[in-house]
Structure formats: C-alpha cells, structure tokens
Image (cartoon, rainbow, N blue to C red):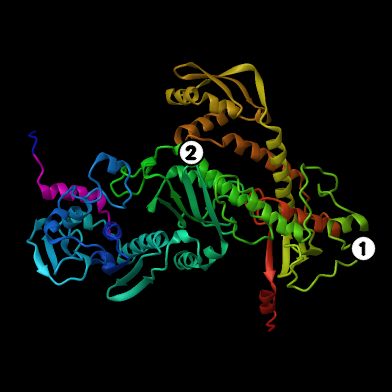
Amino acid sequence: MTIKQLPDILINQIAAGEVVERPASVVKELVENALDAGASRVDIDLEEGGVRLIRIRDNGGGIGADELPLALSRHATSKIASLDDLEGVATLGFRGEALPSIASVSRFSLSSRCEDSAHGSVLEVEGGRVGDVEPRPHPQGTTVEVRDLFFNVPARRKFLRAERTELGHIEEWLRQLALARPDVELRVTHNGKPTRRWKGEGSLLDGGALSDVRLNETLGEEFARNALRVDHAAAGLRLHGWIAQPAYNRASTDQQYLFVNGRAVRDRSVAHAVKQAYSDVLFHGRHPAYVLFLELDPRRVDVNVHPAKHEVRFRDARLIHDFVYRTLHEALAGTRAGIVQSVAAVAAAGTGEAALAGAVANAATAGAMPASTGYMPQSPLGLQVAETRAGYAALYGGRGIDTASPPPQLPDSGDATLPPLGYALAQLHGIYILAESAEGLVVVDMHAAHERIGYEKLKSAHDGAGLSTQPLLVPATLAVSEREADVAEREAATLAELGFEVTRSGPQSLTLRSVPALLAHGDVEALLRDVLADLREHGESRRVAAARDELLATMACHGAVRANRRLTLPEMNALLREMEATERSGQCNHGRPTWTRFGLPEIDRWFLRGR
C-alpha cells in the first residue's frame, strides 16, 4: 500500500467526526467562541432541531476581515501561542479545530466586524470550498451560520435523531451554560418562535439573589427550595455552588452539573467523591442533585484530554477527591431534622464546625437537649429520658409536665422559642410520633429517627477511640494481579492507616498480616481487593469506613425502638430533641426520611378552610 497525504477537506471531516457529534456540538463550540470573545449577549436561532440551521450572533470583540480566512484554517487560534499557554488555558476553546471542522460538513457563513472597522465582512464556505472575503454591513460582533449540517456526509446525517431529540440536547447544554454564566444574556428561537430567554443578571459567584433566580429558572423551584449552599476554600482550591438535600433525589444523574474553572465537564473522580459524601443519607438506587463549581490554578488541571473538552485531568486527583468529599460530607452533616435552612457558607479552611454549631445553637435555644457523647441504652429508647416532673423541667426549660398530663401548652404559632420539631402530642399506630410545631403538624418515624441517632453516636464513639487492628494468627497469602500488587506496594502506608498490614511477597502475591479489628470476622480479603481497586482508580478509598459503618448501622438498627413500642410523652419529646441535635437526622441510615411537616395552610386546604 502507498502512503499518501490526505487532502485538507478530508482531514477536516475526520476532525469533525471528533468535534461535531450532533447539532448540540456545533452550538457548544460556537457559543464558547462567543464567550471567549467577550460577548455579553448571544442569540441562538435554530431550525429543525439545528439540522437545517444554526445561527449564533454575539456582541463580542469580532474578527478582522484579514483574519477571517485564517479563522477557518486548522489549528489557528488567538487563545494560545506556546506550551506555557496550553498548560494554563483559561479560555473555553483553544484547539483551533471547531470552525474548519464545522465548515467542512455544512454550508457555512462567517460574518464579523471589530469595533474599529468601518464595515463588516463575510466569508462563505460550501463543500469545503472557501470563498472570498466580501464586505457586508454588520454590527460589532460575529455571526456564524451553519446550514444543512452533514449535507455532504450522509452517513453521519443518518445517525441524527428526531428534531425534538436534537433540540433537547441543545437545550440541555444551554441550561449548563445558563448556570455557569448568568452574566450573559441568552436568547433562543426555534423554527422562528422564541423559546427561551435568560437575562444577564450578574455573576453566579456573587452569592446574591440574582444567582438564586437563575438557579430557579434552570433547575426549577423544587431544586432551589431544597438546595444547600456550599462555599469552601483550602489548599488553593475552592468548591462552591449548591447541593440538594438528601430528601430531594433523582432516579438518574440528570441534575448533576460540575464546572471546573467555568468549564462544564464530566469527571469520574469528582462524581465518586460526591457519591461517597451522600453514601448513608441517600436511598438505594437514587442519585443526588448538585451544581458545583471547582476553581483551581489552571496549571493544576489539564483540559487538553478530550477533543470536545468534555473531560479534564487533575494533576492532584487524590487531593481533589478528598477535598470534594470532605466539603460535601460536612455540609450534609449540618442537616438536622426540623432545621430547614441552607447550610451557611463554609468559608476558609476548616471543618465548618462554626456553621454546624450555629444550627445546633438554634435548636438549643428552642429547648433542644444536647446530644450525649455515647450510645447509652439507659431507657427503652437508649436516651437520657426524664420520667419525673423535675427531670422534664430540666430538659424543656421549666415546662414541667407529668407523664399522665396533657402535652405542654404551646405558644402562638409564630413564637420563636418553639423547638424546630415542636412538642409531641401522641403516637399513631405505635409507629409515628405526632407533634405540634410553630408551622403546623410534624410526623416522625420513631424507629428510623432513633436508628439514625444511635448510628451517629456509634460512629462518634468509634472515631474517638481510633482504628484498632487485629493481627492474623496465620498470615494470609493472596493471589492478585501484578497491577494490584504494584498498588499495594506503592500504597503500603495508606493501607496501614486503613488497618491492613500488607507486604508484597511476589510479582502476583501479597501477604496479609493484620486487618481492621472491627471487621476481622468478615471477608477481609475481598475488602482488601476492593480497597486496592479504589486506590488504583481514585487514589483514595473509604471501603473500610463504609464496611465499618455498615456494621454499626446494623447495630443501631437492632438497638432502635421498635414499632408498637408505646412511648411516654417525655420519651417522645426526648427523641425529638435528639433529632434536632443529631447530624443527618433527616434520613435514617438507609436514606429513608425520618420526618415530614404539614404546614397549617396545607392542612387548611384539606378541609377547604380559609384564613
């Protein structure tokens, strides 16, 4: 076979196969160019889902007439000039492949005018043949028209879906853009009809009300109502945005948005860290929702790993994973039953204890009982319950009550001294606690709530005692792959911190001499293999902690109060106060909700009452 140089048109069409997957890919590349040019307004006109027409108009800096032909040359760009620029890319585009690739598979027109130009210019391309630059009236900025996408590549056109499907892909990408750049006005029309307009409303980074409006517009009122604000910075990293409370979860990952230095990307390591942070508050098979912005030095992230720039590679992947996990883990720990509020911004380095302490203080002010330090089953509830009038008075700020008496007289519904979960009124079918709060009626699943309380106390007790290891009477030899043996040898210190004493005894064998004491009776060899897999893929593993937590969760479940156990009012109120002071108490260990609230307006509607 003879080696031949490929013609330019074929080279561009091959590149288009990587860059231009569907109309949404074209919209993405062209709008990103507009943003890099400093546009504050972008108009997107579409016909037939973008297959017939994509027209992108912006008010950015524009392109000079003499540079229009160069803009359609491969690897011609104004965004990088050296390897140093490539290692610290701060723009959305930089490869210089998008325009020539798009032009090679469509009927293409590029019009533009710079601020200092007397008139605009246009350059047209069809079938890979570039015309001449001609003068044309045009406001400052750039207009790109892409007609009849894939008209000359019928095999590619066959893979396009229905008009509604292709339009849906474009709308989803624009939704991401609207989240990342609320300072830019976006106007969308389809088949001549306006379909969407996002007004430019300021920066998403300012944390103000305008950001909340954009969040509501893009992801809906329900997400905005359940969103917890996160803002944490440490080690040259900053993570900010919104995560949904565990009660708001999804059947798929359709509301998971990650932006790295303003670029929408998919990253398995960050997704894994988020999943771990939600591990014991989310129901099995459900997915969390979030909009997260990760900011770091551009030189610490490689954006040149995917033709369409959907993925990035972090130079400190382990640090990123740990930073994201700990930030979200602590934010979720601050959620407590009855305290419905966004988590305070966790600014600067630290664990966010001040924000969590504030939430606990609110509950304490309202009469909440401080959480005890250990899991002490001193009553059928495993709680410090005051059975006498004096003990009850000590717990509830002087509101003494006999267990045979009616519940305490509640203040007016607007009284700020009421505890968040209110005061118990009765039990329902031996399963639920009914309580009156300032807002209306609170219903608590007593077993699920008590299970979470016991679980958190067990975890705290074991965390305080530290990890203990148990030597094996006879060291175990494990047959592993050479890659697993390499990881074990390289990560010996990390494995030791997790309770495993492991040495390499051959190219494909390991010797295990000690294991985590709490898990010694389980399948520790399988656990070790899972840990090695995590270390290889993510540079970090919480398998040991997860296995320990699973065991503690089982213990907490067995120790929790059972259905049909009749509780006294002091016991019910003690449980409510513990819920208000316990981390993650809005869900049980399996992710099921522990409580719900029915507001008075909602109850009034049940009975067609007006107020």
Mark 2 vs mark 1: which is more N-terminal?
2
Question: Above or below — where is 232 with respect to 140?
Answer: above
Whole-percent x and y of residue 220? Answer: 49, 67
Q: Badge 2 is on which residue?
A: 319
Q: What's the amino acid at mark 1?
A: Ala
Instruction: Give me the residue at 53% from left, 35% from top.
Output: 541
Quadrant of the frame with the N terminus: top left
Q: Is residue 377 above or below residue 207?
A: above
Which SS does the magenta portion mostly show?
Answer: helix
Q: Secondary structure at mark 2?
A: helix
Question: Does 22 appear in magenta?
Answer: yes
| Mark 2 vs 1: CB contact within 8 A | no
The residue that disc 1 covers is 404
Work out which residue is located at the far front of the displayed protein and give it. 116
Q: Residues within 10 Å of mark 2 (few under 14, many from 20)?
A: some
Quadrant assignment, res 64: bottom left
Nearer to me, 466 or 24 = 466
- Residue 124 seen in this snapshot: yes
Picture coordinates of residue 531 (x, y %)?
A: 53, 32
Q: Which residues are magenta?
A: 5-25
